[in-house]
């Protein structure tokens, strides 16, 4: 099944392989792609994947993760991405920009020395994985519409100016701002954006609705942190049961596919990543929640054609995501196709 076409709503894919977003740290000081970025993404464009999600782009100056991160918060910043998206033209690969507001998930301490930078979070908490070693400020609810608007405007710039012909993916996992709101470990607000699941998910739902309305004809995905804990660990924080409810609402809002990963447990670094498909129980639960009405991906520790086919055949997921293998080997998909990657 891996190399069969997939047609579902706005998704028209040559095969079921997704290049998952992996930060390349290759932008210049203005967040524009460099020759190194173009070399990396030329590899993706020619890799043979069906769908490529390009590493997180900042939607707001305060939402940056690193100084050299790609940016979509102004027209000039969006235009600087054209050489990158051009690489995908006429390749048949659907190319999508991942949109992010990092908040307390930011990882570059030098951001704190930028004029007017604010490290924001739902409740002023530090993330469990506190990469920046700094206190954050609780976001005033009056600022939340600005964040929602920033995602919607960034989505339009991604499609209309930067040339992301596929569309966008909203980054709601790995402990970044939208994931911080979803998790009771980092969200203890007592307003309409904290407390029970409906309230913790409100910002994600409002953002997804705004982006859907902003780019009605383009692909819209959400990468959802399905739990704060890795599979098999005692559940504290955001649970899989809660994420299944979130996924169903995302379906109703009109997302075209759901990416599945971890939230505060991030994406499995430090685990025995082998060929274990460690997030497959999460993908399976999310796929059940949406009744297989939209595609759901599985990514994390998938290394072989046999494992990918097994996941697809067993109805665990509809799309197979690869992160590190594609970074390490430009011919990885060719290997899968030819059977040299077992
Ligand atoms: C260095 C690095 C950077 C990453 N950057 C992102 C990112 O920008 N957005 C995202 O959603 N996931 C990011 N991820 C997670 C990957 O997309 C993927 O989920 C993870 O690497 C597990 O898949 P794999 O075992 O195939 O590598 C990153 C992973 C790594 C190792």
Image (tube, rainbow, N blue to C red):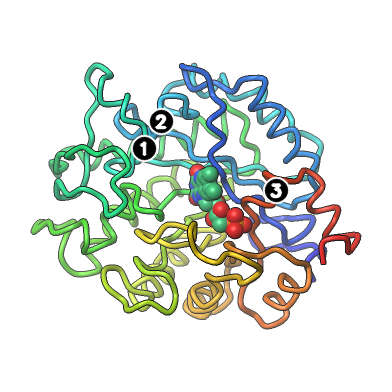
The residue identified by callout 3 is 326
Check the image and name the residue furthest to the right. 338
SS at circle 2: loop
Q: Is mark 3 within 8 Å of ligand 1?
A: yes
Q: Residue 107, labelled with which disc?
A: 1
Q: Nearer the viewer, residue 224 or 162?
A: 224
The location of residue 3, given as percent across then percent down, is 82, 63
Residue at image location 80% in from the left, 40% down from the top: 46
Up-down: is 253 above or below 95?
below
Camera-nearest residue between 36 and 98: 36
Asked if the residues shown at circle 3 and circle 1 are in contact, with their CB atoms under 8 angstroms apart, the answer is no
Give how far across and how far down residue 173 sits, in percent.
Answer: 41, 55
For residue 176, above or below residue 293: above
* 3 or 1: tag closer to the N-terminus: 1
- Residue 169 seen in render: no
C-alpha span from label 3 to label 1 = 23 Å
State whether residue 134 appears in this view: yes
The residue indicated by pointer 2 is 66
Mark 2: few/some/many CA within 10 Å (<14, 14-19, 20+): many
Residue 93 marker: none
Does ligand 1 reach within 8 Å of label 2's beta carbon?
no
290 horizontally vs 200: left or right? right
Q: State the residue in front, 195 or 36.
A: 36
Residue at 63% x, 23% y: name it. 82
Q: Are marks 2 and 1 in contact (CB under 8 Å)?
A: yes
């Amino acid at each position: 099944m891996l190399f069969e076409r997939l047609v579902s709503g706005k998704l028209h894919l040559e095969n079921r392989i997704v290049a998952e977003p992996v930060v390349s740290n290759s932008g210049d000081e203005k967040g524009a792609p460099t020759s190194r970025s173009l070399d990396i993404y030329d590899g993706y464009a020619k890799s043979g994947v069906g769908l490529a999600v390009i590493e997180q782009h900042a939607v707001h100056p305060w939402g940056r993760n690193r100084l050299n991160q790609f940016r979509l918060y102004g027209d000039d910043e969006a235009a600087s991405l054209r050489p990158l998206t051009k690489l995908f033209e006429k390749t048949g690969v659907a190319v999508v920009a991942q949109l992010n507001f990092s908040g307390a998930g930011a990882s570059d301490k030098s951001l704190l020395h930028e004029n007017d930078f604010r490290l924001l979070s739902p409740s002023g908490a530090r993330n469990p994985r506190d990469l920046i070693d700094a206190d954050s400020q609780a976001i005033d609810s009056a600022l939340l519409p600005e964040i929602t608007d920033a995602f919607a405007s960034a989505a339009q710039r991604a499609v209309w100016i930067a040339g992301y012909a596929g569309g966008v993916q909203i980054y709601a996992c790995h402990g970044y701002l939208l994931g911080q709101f979803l998790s009771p470990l980092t969200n203890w607000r007592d307003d309409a954006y904290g407390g029970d699941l409906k309230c913790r998910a409100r910002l994600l739902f409002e953002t997804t609705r705004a982006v859907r309305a902003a780019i009605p004809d383009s692909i819209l995905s959400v990468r959802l942190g399905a739990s704060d804990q890795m599979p098999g660990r005692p559940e504290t924080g955001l649970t899989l049961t809660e994420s299944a409810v979130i996924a169903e609402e995302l379906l109703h809002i009109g997302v075209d596919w759901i990416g599945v990963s971890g939230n505060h447990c991030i994406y499995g670094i430090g685990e025995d990543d082998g060929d274990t498909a460690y997030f497959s129980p999460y993908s399976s639960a999310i796929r059940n929640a949406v009744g297989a009405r939209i595609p759901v991906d599985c990514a994390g520790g998938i290394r072989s054609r046999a494992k990918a086919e097994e996941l697809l055949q067993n109805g665990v997921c509809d799309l197979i995501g690869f992160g590190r293998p594609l970074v390490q080997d430009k011919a990885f998909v060719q290997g899968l196709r030819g059977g040299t990657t077992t």
